[in-house]
Image: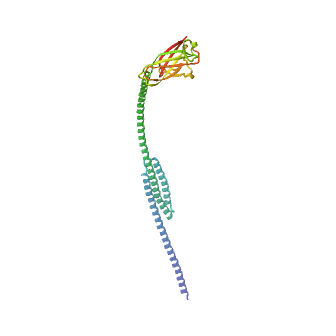
Amino acid sequence: MNNSEESMRKKMIAMAVVIFLLLGTVGYLIFDKSNKQQIIEIQNTELNDAKSLQEDLQTQYEEIMTALDEQKGENEELNAMVDTQKEQLEVKRKEISRMIRKGNATKEDLDFARKEIGNMKVQLGQYLAQLDDLKEQNQILTNEKVQLVEEKKVLQTNIQSERLTNENLSAEKAVLVSKKEELELTNDNLNKKVNYASVIRVTDVSGIGMKLRNSGKMVKKTYAKNVEQVQICFNTTANDIAPIGGEEFLVRVINPIGETMAVEELGSGVFTDSKTKDKIRYTQKTNMEYERTEENSCISWVPNAPFSKGVYEIEVYNKGYLAGTGSFMLK
């Protein structure tokens, strides 16, 4: 091989190397440009997604705020809950917005942001469900309150009506009590009059000193030192008003010094004067069957004590009224 051919061969090799290098460089540049174009397209897509997400976030946020505002009313408690929920959602919106806006947000970040936007909708549904429950409960409470108010009004009306009725009854009762007292007083007066009218008057009230002889015969005595007992007698009068049947007469013997002769062991006692209501001691009592005719009745008073000289007064009572009087004297 001559030098000319060797030189040409070397040139050919050198040219081949240069061409190869050029082709490699061109290939690399084409590949690099293709990668960069792909990256740019991905970034553009992510930017578009981020912009779309921001718009979607804002749209959803505004819809949620509007939906929550519509829940407000006159109930301050519910309004406060709505405001609290709006504040919580505002914090959530800012977090998602920051996540979307950051320059190095990845597809995973955007997917997560998209998921969080969806969660906001879910959270809104939960909030609305809670508010509906509270509204329903408040409505129930409101209805119950209205019912209680109505029942209270009815109760107050009933109480007022009952109070008025009671006042009327009290007034009527007072009138009845007054009339009853008047009737009782009238009846009492009538009973007193009837009772007084039915008193059996007695006449010929007398007393005689007596002494028991050794023979067993009772004889009259006029000297006090010889008297062992006194016999008190009286005659009943006819009274058509007095009922037929048993009648009781109380005999009161008053000694010369004004004392009622009485010994409880011998049948003495105390009665109430129907006219004066005074308590009066009596000496002895006697019972008889009254037939509305004149009849004689006697009692014997044996006090087992000496008698004094002087005048002895006798009082006979029937039904608590003084029916007759008499006297006797012992020398």
Where's residue 169, x and y in %? 41, 33
Where's residue 112, x and y in %? 50, 62
Against 106, residue 315 (above or below) is above
Where's residue 246, x and y in %? 47, 25
Q: Nearer the viewer, residue 171 or 18?
A: 171
Against 40, residue 190 (above or below) is above
Q: Nearer the viewer, residue 258 or 313?
A: 313
Where, quadrant-wise, is the N terminus in this rendering? bottom right
Where, quadrant-wise, is the C terminus in this rendering? top right
Against 8, residue 280 (above or below) is above
Residue sticking out furthest to the top: 331
* Residue drawn at point x = 52 percent, y = 18 percent: 252
Q: Nearer the viewer, residue 30 or 270?
A: 270
Q: Nearer the viewer, residue 277 or 263?
A: 263
Which colour scheme appears in the figure? rainbow
Where's residue 24, x and y in %? 51, 76
The reply to whether residue 63 is in sight is: yes
Horizontal side, residue 153 vs residue 305: left or right: left
Horizontal side, residue 100 vs residue 172: left or right: right
* Residue drawn at point x = 51 percent, y = 17 percent: 232
Residue sticking out furthest to the bottom: 1
| Quadrant of residue 57 within the rendered picture | bottom left
The reply to whether residue 258 is in sight is: no
| Quadrant of residue 293 within the rendered picture | top left
